[in-house]
């Protein structure tokens, strides 16, 4: 039987109790995953997932069309009973803002940064490229404060599509590093491309200093705004492959030639089927994030009766990313009731 290697991740709040999430690695070799680390993109889970994705076969990459005009604002009062630093909700088709709170306030966003990392990679159109997990990722993870990991094994050869799964579902900083290092080429060049892409998209309230949302070089070195994140989210969700990835509950990659087997679970509580998840009907994505400064954040999208709403909440207090689920649920319920 294959040996199973577990990368355990906890919360990224100092002194908080650990809420486990597992990225499972299996294979014939006795190698260990890159790190046993913890992060705020955490979910509590138990048992084996009942939702298994087909091993990665690169789909046709559909370029994202031009963005809709800048969203129009609405003064309608918003959902009650939520604790956030900022947030907004928009009709994804029309660009009309249904609700906003500190719409243009610049705040840290944690692992939501990985949405831009994915966009930069997707724009290359090379989903079948085979990339070797570099040894240098070990030192990178050790240098960071509680990074979330996908449990990647150094030396494994994975496709770009498989690495996107590893980055977007369990929020693997090891996968983000591997992609950024390969596509920069080099980390510095990749981050420069992220900021160039942000400028091209008109994200004037957004700045990146890394590829995974870790607080480097400081907790406030990178930032975005609710308005900018709605634009970022709409852009990313227009890529079919991105939408397919972030809409999954879990993904299973069987062990194969050149790599171990992996199992990854989505950190988005609106999609999860684990204890503590919210499982909001109609949710289609997209990404959670948190650091000590960012607190709990979620960028989310859901469809009901043919209407798609995209929203974001930043700065929810707490140490468990599952707490973003009830917040996003209140925002979505309010939004669908006020169309």
Image: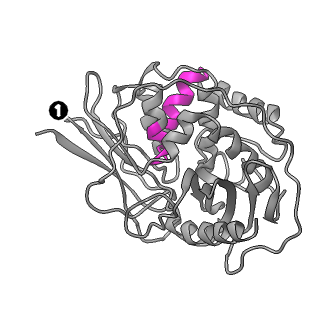
Quarter of the picture holding the C terminus: bottom right
The colour scheme of the drawn protein is one colour
Q: Is residue 113 above or below residue 161?
A: below
Residue 139 visible in the current orientation: no
Q: Bounds of the magenta span? A: 165-185
Instruction: Tell me: 275 left or right of 94.
Output: left
Residue 191: x and y in percent read: 67, 32
According to the image, label 1 marks what residue? 28
Residue 5 visible in the current orientation: yes
Residue 90: x and y in percent read: 75, 57
Image quadrant where residue 180 sits: top right
Q: Is residue 188 above or below residue 82?
A: above
> In this view of the protein, which residue sits in the foreground, 335 or 216?
335
Q: Is residue 187 above or below residue 276?
A: above
Q: Which is the main secondary structure of the residues drawn in magenta? A: helix
Residue 206: x and y in percent read: 78, 45
Residue under the image location 67 percent in, 69 percent down: 331
> In this view of the protein, which residue sits in the foreground, 332 or 138?
332
Instruction: Tell me: 292 left or right of 90.
Output: left
* Identity of the residue furthest to the left in this view: 1
Residue under the image location 64 percent in, 53 percent down: 306
Question: Number of callouts in the render?
Answer: 1
**Mark 1 crowd level (few <14, some 14–19, many ≥20, 10 Å Cα):** few
Residue 134: x and y in percent read: 42, 26
Residue under the image location 49 percent in, 49 percent down: 147
Residue 273 lies in the magenta-colored region = no
């Amino acid at each position: 039987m294959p040996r199973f290697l577990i990368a355990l991740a906890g919360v990224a709040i100092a002194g908080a109790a650990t809420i486990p999430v597992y990225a499972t690695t299996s294979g014939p070799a006795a190698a260990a995953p890159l790190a046993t680390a913890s992060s705020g993109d955490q979910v509590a889970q138990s048992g084996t997932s009942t939702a298994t994705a087909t091993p990665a076969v690169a789909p046709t990459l559909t370029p994202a069309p031009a963005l809709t005009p800048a969203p129009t604002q609405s003064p309608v009062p918003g959902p009650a009973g939520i604790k956030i630093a900022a947030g907004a909700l928009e009709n994804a088709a029309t660009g009309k803002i249904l609700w906003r709170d500190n719409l243009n306030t610049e705040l840290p966003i944690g692992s939501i940064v990985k949405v831009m990392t994915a966009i930069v990679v997707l724009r290359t159109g090379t989903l079948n490229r085979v990339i070797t997990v570099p040894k240098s990722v070990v030192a990178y993870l050790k240098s960071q404060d509680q990074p979330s990991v996908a449990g990647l094994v150094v030396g494994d050869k994975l496709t770009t599509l498989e690495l996107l799964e590893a980055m977007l579902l369990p929020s693997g900083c090891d996968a983000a590093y591997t992609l950024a290092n390969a596509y920069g080429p080099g980390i510095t060049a990749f981050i420069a491309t992220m900021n160039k892409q942000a400028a091209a998209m008109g994200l004037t309230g957004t700045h990146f200093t890394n590829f995974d949302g870790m607080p480097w070089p400081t907790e406030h070195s990178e930032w975005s705004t609710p308005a900018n994140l709605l634009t970022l989210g709409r852009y990313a969700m227009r890529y079919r492959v991105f939408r397919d990835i972030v809409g999954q509950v879990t993904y299973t990659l069987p062990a194969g030639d050149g790599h171990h087997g992996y199992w990854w679970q989505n950190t988005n509580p609106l999609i999860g089927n684990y204890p503590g998840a919210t499982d909001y009907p109609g949710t289609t994505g997209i990404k959670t994030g948190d650091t000590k400064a960012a607190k709990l954040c979620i960028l989310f999208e859901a469809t009901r009766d043919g209407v798609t709403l995209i929203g974001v909440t930043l700065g929810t207090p707490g140490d468990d990313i599952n707490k973003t689920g009830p917040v996003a649920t209140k925002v979505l319920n309010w939004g669908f009731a006020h169309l």
